Image (cartoon, rainbow, N blue to C red):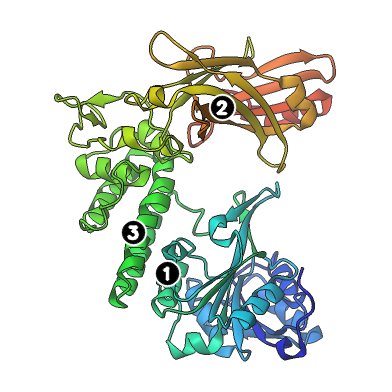
Amino acid sequence: MHPDPSPADAGAVSVVVIGHDDAAHVADAVRSALGQGPAVREVVAVDDCSTDGSAELLERLAAAEPRLRVVGLPVNSGGCGTPRNTGLDAAAAPYVMFLDSDDVLPPGAVDALLAAARETEAQVTGGLCVRRELPSGREVPWEPALYASPAVVARPADRPRLVRDTLSVNKLYATDFLRAHGIRFPDGRFPYEDMVFTARVWAAAPRVALVPDRVYVWHVRRATPRLSISLDRTGVDNWRARTHACRTAHAILLDAGEKGLARAVRTKFLDHDLRMYVRELPLRDEAYRRAWWAHTRAHLAEYDAADRSGDPAAPGMLLARVLLASPEPRDLPRLRELAARPSRLCPPYARTADGMPCWSAELPEVTLETLPERPVRLLPLAVDAELRARTRLLRLRLHELYGAVGRAGPVDAEVEWRHRDRAGLVLRRTLPLRPAADGAWTAATPVPLERLASLGTGAWDLRLRLRFRDGATRTVSAHALTGPGLLRPRATPSPHHGLILVRPYATHGGALALRVAAGPQDARRLLTGRLRRWLP
């Protein structure tokens, strides 16, 4: 927490809150902005022609709070850009920031950003955003490497990684800076408008301050009738909108002479956007896959030699090379593993006729000559996890990768069970890795069901930390093997809980995870409506 702002900072910030048909959450967003204290001169709540009573709710709040101004749009704009622009036009304070109606500002956010902006004379000041999964409350930081420590960046070109943070809401802007450069959001229905807005911001070459403070809480509600744009990815039009926004951001920076930042936009697309959607391809139907594949190949064909000059074995680059080499969708399970975080390159490990490592015998033109030379911490190592519910024995197999694993010398694997919804709840055990006759390395250990059930029921993710001869480590996921007797739910008698129910399953990324329940209460809950989640 930061101390109260100086008198000079009082009333320095306008917070623009936008919403449409979100009466269930908008009051919490507004109160979180007003609760920032005297630094907030006003909260400008822009209602995008709601029909659920949001506007009336805001008016009632404004009647009791002089710092709250409500602006209503007469016609729904269809997107987030127009209401944000409306709020920006109305903002009267020297600084402005944006807040969506279903999110909140954590206490002290405005003070932290404003103090850094004043001290560094920055036109743009950014802080840490966390994605909070609801209802579990699990939090995942957004681009934490950018906000690990305080920093001042004279111009964005000095830190190209800035383009990876495409959010507009975790930043404080000098209002005159935005207006002087004509920086606005795309109007109307324009999905992923933040990407374009932030590109316009970086193109104007502001002085940037970064703070490690939490300044924005992004609420992720997956079980809701109306998903957010970033979550509603089941239709291929969502992907078309995302590639269009990325293409527009690239063009904005290129036109501004920021070639390095423009190239960083495309690098980010390969490493983030492409990997995210590839992970979901096996979940889509055949029509979606074919439309997605054709559109993505056309988009990637726009990349020039400079955009492809990075490490050809980097996961995003390798995904792009496979896509461009194959006119039809192929190898989707293997591509999903490559797109995972951490990345896994699963067998088969093919070679060309002259011995060069390559993607597969069917695509020998996608060569992997640089892969064996990558540092072990960057290798897309593949570990298979076999779990038979009957024996509760977890067997691990680390695959060789064109000789790179053998040269590194695997020593042991730290097996880590991490509770998905309770941060810091971890159970670890270290196992020796032993060479197998087929050139792989193996380890085995019983699954500690009693301990897991005692620590906390729910979902447990499996992660492994591999250690090598020189002390280097690599954190990997374990690929869940399927087949007869594998990944089947099982009830096990327990001396402490009476009964433990365990269901092994493969996550969307293909990694092994467990869902654990224990005791009569959990069993009763399953039997009264949730049993289907446990059945194969």
The residue wearing badge 3 is: 266
How far is the residue under mark 1 from the one under mark 3?
A: 17 Å
Q: Residue at x 85, y 19 (%)?
A: 496
Residue 176's place in the image compared with 124, above or below, is below
The residue wearing badge 1 is: 158
Tags 3 and 2 in contact by the CB under 8 Å rule?
A: no
The amino acid type found where label 3 is placed reads: Arg
x, y percentage for residue 443? 55, 16
Q: Residue at x 81, y 24 (%)?
A: 519
Report which quarter residue 219 is drawn in: bottom right
Look at the numbered disc 2 and give the secondary structure of its residue: strand
Nearest-to-viewer mark from 1 and 2? 1
Nearest-to-viewer mark from 3 and 2? 3
The residue wearing badge 2 is: 505
**How many numbered dots are placed on residues in this image?**
3
How far is the residue under mark 1 from the one under mark 2?
A: 44 Å
Residue 195 seen in the current view: yes
**Residue count near mark 3 (Cα–Cα under 10 Å), binned few <14, some 14–19, many ≥20:** many
The amino acid type found where label 2 is placed reads: Tyr
Residue 45 seen in the current view: no
**Residue count near mark 1 (Cα–Cα under 10 Å), binned few <14, some 14–19, many ≥20:** few
Q: Earlier in the sequence, mark 3 or mark 2?
A: 3
The amino acid type found where label 1 is placed reads: Asp
How far is the residue under mark 3 from the one under mark 2?
A: 34 Å
Residue 32's place in the image compared with 138, above or below, is below
Tags 1 and 2 in contact by the CB under 8 Å rule?
A: no
Q: Which corner quadrant holds the N terminus?
A: bottom right
Q: Earlier in the sequence, mark 1 or mark 3?
A: 1
